[in-house]
Image: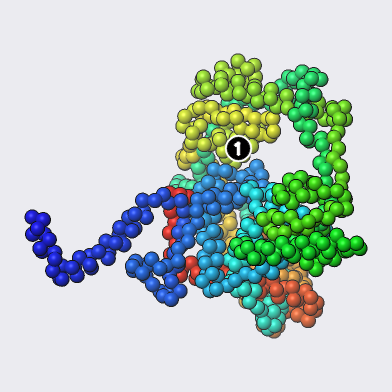
Amino acid sequence: MLQKLRDKTSGWIATVILGLLIVPFAFVGIEQYLGQRTDNSVAKIDAPPTWWPSAPSFWPVSVFWQHDSIGIDEFRRAFEQERQRQRAQQGEAFDARAFESVDNKRAILDGLIDARVQQLSAQRDGMVVSDAMVRKAIQEVPAFQVDGKFDYTRYKLALASQVPAQNERQFEQVVRESLQQSMVVAGVAGSNFVTAAEMDRLLGLLGERRDASVLPLPPAVADTGAVSAAEIQKWYDGHATTYRAPEAVTIEFVEVNSATLPAPAPADEATLRQRYEQEKNRYTEAEQRLASHILVRVPEGADAAAQKAAEQKATQLAAQAKAPGADFAALARANSDDTGSQAVGGDLGWVSKGMMVGPFESALFAMKAGEISGPVKTEFGWHVIQLRDLKAGAQESFEQVRETLAREQAEADRERAASEFSSRLVDLTLKNPSSLAPAAREMNIPLQKLGPFSRSNAQGVAANPAVLRAAFSDNLIQDGTISDPIELEPGHSVLIRVTSHTPERALTLAQVRDQVIAAVRADRASKAARKDADALLARVKAGESLEAIAASRLLPPPQVLPNVPRGAPVPEASVAEAIFAVAAPAAGKVSVGQSQLADGRVVLFTVSKVTPGDVASMPPAQREMVQQQVAGFGGNDDVRALVSSMRKRVTVTVVERNL
């Protein structure tokens, strides 16, 4: 059988057929092989080759596409950063459960995708960020400045304090990528402009003033007429969502407050001395050295010849710096490759141990005051170091810090006692998770009750957002178990249990009959008042003045409002908005309109004159500022349109399971 198979497949026709079959199977095989790997991406971005922008993604040539992705770690970092930002902004109102929603995750991911698409577009268009641009961006970061000027020491400390820590080259690469990403959109945003004619028209509208008269009508006359059963039923059926009882719960809870627990005994002398020995470094002022340096940078990947040349240059600079009368600062300004300290003569300020890379630090702390080192090699290149001054470290004695130690130990003891108390309480609740009463009796603390309450009328401890979220959580409602400790403030927490729950429900007509009757009557009164106002408005449109209308109804004369500016709350913002919404009156005529006050009363008004804003009265500097702001608004719209267009030119695949 195998021989027959070999004979059948040895002809040239069979060879061609097999060859054609191999091609698709090869691509399928590759895809299957790659598919077996663990996918650590949250989103994949695929861009067609620049030489075929319209290439379909299903075509085999897609292997030549440009592929990028957003990893789980990158997404998680962005997600946590946004979580911290919103928590700091919203405080106790921050809802951690709502933040974890899928919609919120997609919104954060969309921001990352937009940024990556912008960077990809800049790379494909050949946009390059120069070293000078990177340096300028870094030196303009306020966190790296002291008294408004870039400070190299502050810069190094800031990089070292990041988690994880970054060196200068890593941070420069981050800045470079960020600048590259923003180049296109920044250019588009900055290219928007507003013409002089557009500004004149806008300023004329913004500065427009109107002469108006307003006549508030009296409140609607209360309706006391009978309400039929049919009217009641119709209103109830049409406003069913209005007559609902909100979801409500009743809880029992216990409090653990370190301030009310018995105070622990004061710490003895031995405990305080032991704490002092353990934390001795806190009370030690580290030795500091005032240093300057000259850096001869060695490019990454430089060959031996370049390394040697840099070392020789550093040796020559060291010799010049050691020469009698030499000006080290001048040499640094003329020769140093350290952009952060070059302009200030190589000054690094006061340096403590741990602030500099190992070889630099070892050399600096082995020097004597006034000494200049020979070339010192680090990952950045060769350094010539000058030690200008030093401050010896100092150690505070136990007696000097005893009061601080005692206060801190007492606080620690209180926190530990509260923690142990809370732990014992939790252990007891775990033995009987369906009731707080046994644990409260065992720990001799009161068992308190609260409710029923809804999300909108919670009081006491239930008004705390964290307690409110727990009280209405599905777990506590469905299981009837006890919550974990919920912190109200440091050292003060509660444990709660939902004892009863009433879901949101429709109120029966019998329960709200009086409310429905009142609503029907209020609606009839409002409609009658509106109909009356419409009739009065028709009389004004027919040529009757507001004064005559007021006199016919024995109302106070209308209020005259000359030169009302746009946005003025006269008599209320809604009325002013309506005054500026009507068309400008013809010569000798008035424009007529009506609005409603917050208390429901109707206001009739007329506009007799419109005065455009005086464009020439705005100072040139202020006009320019407004013009830039308006252009900025338009630029932001252009950026959104551009990013949307960029998204359409790439294929984005979201890996939902990794969100």
Q: Nearer the viewer, residue 164 or 110?
A: 164
Task: Place residue 593 in its image quadrant.
Answer: bottom right
Say above or below: 82 vs 476.
below
Please tell me whether mark 1 sits on a helix, a strand or a loop: helix
Residue located 60% across and 21% down the image: 425
Lateral position of residue 243 relative to residue 577, left or right:
left
Say above or below: 350 vs 489.
below
Say above or below: 75 vs 484.
below
Residue marked by disc 1: 466
Q: Nearer the viewer, residue 31 or 227?
A: 31
Residue located 77% across and 21% down the image: 271
Lateral position of residue 518 relative to residue 45, left or right:
right
| Relative image position of residue 497 (x, y in whole percent) | 55, 28
Residue located 82% across and 37% down the image: 284
| Relative image position of residue 105 (x, y in whole percent) | 51, 51
| Relative image position of residue 298 (x, y in whole percent) | 67, 62
Could one spot residue 114 in this view of the protein? no
**Residue found at the far right of this picture:** 325
Lateral position of residue 325 relative to residue 617, left or right:
right
